Image (spheres, helix red, strand yellow):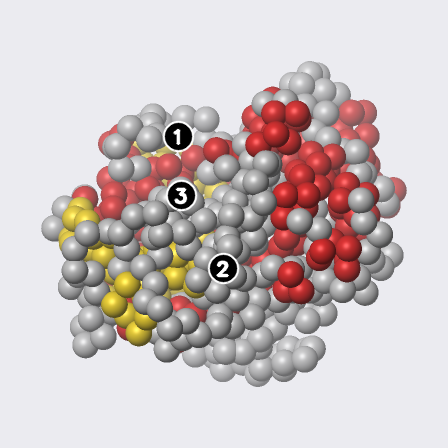
Amino acid sequence: MKALASLLLFGASLASASGLGLQNILQSVEQDDPFVDPINGLHKRATPPGDMPVIDLGYVKQKATEYGTAGNVSYYIFRNVRFAAPPVGELRFRKPQPPAKVEEVQDGYYNGSLSCAQPAGLAGSTGGTEDCLFLDVWMPATASPEKPLPVLTKWFGGGYVYGAKEKAGNPVALWKNGHDPFVFVAPNYRLGVFGWLSVPNTGVDANAGLHDGLAAMDWIRENIGKFGGDIKRSTAMGISAGAGIVMHAMVSNRTPHVPFQQVLLQSPGWQPETTPAGRVPIYETLLANAGCKDTACLRNTSTKALQTANLLTILLWNQDALGPTSGFYPVPDGDILLDHPANLFTEGKVHPTVKRAVASSARWEASGAFAVPEEADDELFIKDVGVSFTSNTTLIKIISEAYPSDGTPQSGYNRGRDLTGDMGFNCNGLWVARYFSTLNNKSKKKSGSGKSKKCCCKSKGKKSSAWRYEFNVGTAAHGADSTYTWFANDGTSKVDRPDLVKYQQDWVAEFVQTQKVSWPVWVEGSDAKALWLNDTGLGVERDYFAWKTYTERCDVLRTKVIGKGGDKA
């Protein structure tokens, strides 16, 4: 049986990868990091034709890689713009550092995807590379510093263990449907053990992958104007883990504040830990799989060997072999994250630059991911919570009472599905909606703690807005709405309701361009409204996840479970 914890965010894909056979997956990790030059790095296998624009970024002159048209929009793509130094050698497991100055003009051309190192086979991944801290910029030909366009930054999902900036969508579909142009940015961030080891006193920087995201945001703040982007009309969006990156950035303990005013969070996902002690099994298992005794040894291990160790560690984690762990997720570290986001959003400790949010849920976030037979009984549910989520008997009792038996033969499955969906996705969207719906014009005193008192502060100023939408089309499983958002009708994907694609893309484009959507704002209560996309069409209805039953479960998780397991790492 797969764990509640391990299945959050990417269970179905990992199940598919596991089906490939461990030996086949291991054989796919054959090549060491392909880069030979840690500064320039990119293999120039071909030269794009045409006279491409060059942007001077100070540390490098970046030439456009591609030119294209979509609808009435002509655009340039600047592929693989380096925003941080290669995180290799002594920088492995460390916070990202500024990129070195390069004299040669870079055109970003590379024959393939520059994804960060990850297990080959997951959702089509080919394994990636450690030297991966790049981003892509899609610049409409009409964009200029004098007449800047809105900016949309998209963060990919993949359970913090797989994915890439090139995956899961680009603006072409929206432009083909006649929407006005905007500048589009897609960054990478480190994955798996490369980005999410967070055990104190081991010589690793906690939350390195989140620091990658923050470094990319700093780059956007400083440079997007050179591509004709208007940083004062900036939207950040993500799906699953990508939305999790955005949410954690919004409550990060740092200045300057995040460079966006609104967010579009599709099923924001991660599993909050119950105890920091859950971080240790991942680290110790990685050491064993790499044949190492400490982090110094891990830093001297080849990319190929560490890729294999990463894969083995993820597979063991997914199979419950490590017991309850913190997984590969952002965690409070006393530095960049002073607490769990559930608490920080509830306390209003959110970057004040962000004023608006759309947060979504799929109707069945955990369907198919909680791989327990539908006839699973209540005893199996309790056992699985203890094996995969927390061994603390007090917390197990609290969870059991918050998710009571429904008396059916499938009760164990239903309880597990609900807990997984709430802990991993639904409650995260609730924290965001609550915060933005209650923010008002009253000035509030700054509040925060830690190294930078100015960072996590209570917001003040203009009234903010929250909107919610529920996706209930087809299987209504986690991530299904992302396909509708980026569907281009090019044969690479299919949808159950093609007629809903245009509506989904219309309101996303409207939000980016006008900072609003066409359905009512969300206000918590029994009559909280959300846009529903259903098999029968669309309409504004009560927000299913705002019903008292569900909000009370989330409140129990926040106040009595998350971080309440005791023990230090």
Q: Is residue 221 above or below residue 245?
A: below
Task: Say whether residue 485 is visible.
Answer: yes
Label 1 sits on residue = 473
Q: CA distance from mark 1 to mark 3?
A: 33 Å
Type of amino acid under label 1: Val
In percent of the image, x 16 and y 55: which residue is there? 50
Determine whether label 2 and label 1 are within 8 Å by CB.
Answer: no
Q: Is residue 202 left or right of residue 190?
A: right
Q: Position of residue 538 (x, y in %)?
A: 31, 36
Which one is earlier in the sequence, the residue at label 2 or at label 1? 2
Which one is earlier in the sequence, the residue at label 1 or at label 3? 3
Q: Residues within 10 Å of mark 2 (few under 14, many from 20)?
A: few
For marks 2 and 1, give the one nearer the viewer.
Answer: 2
Q: CA distance from mark 2 to mark 1?
A: 47 Å
Q: Secondary structure at mark 3?
A: loop
Task: Say whether residue 423 is visible.
Answer: no
Which one is earlier in the sequence, the residue at label 3 or at label 2? 2
Label 2 sits on residue = 37
Type of amino acid under label 3: Gly
Q: Quadrant of residue 305?
A: top right
Q: Secondary structure at mark 2?
A: loop
- Which mark identifies residue 112? 3
For marks 3 and 2, give the one nearer the viewer.
Answer: 2
Q: Quadrant of residue 332?
A: bottom right
Q: Is residue 339 left or right of residue 505?
A: right
In percent of the image, x 56 and y 70: which residue is there? 97
Q: Residues within 10 Å of mark 1 (few under 14, many from 20)?
A: many
Q: Position of residue 402 (x, y in %)?
A: 72, 41
Q: Is residue 311 above or below residue 497?
A: below
Q: Quadrant of residue 318?
A: top right
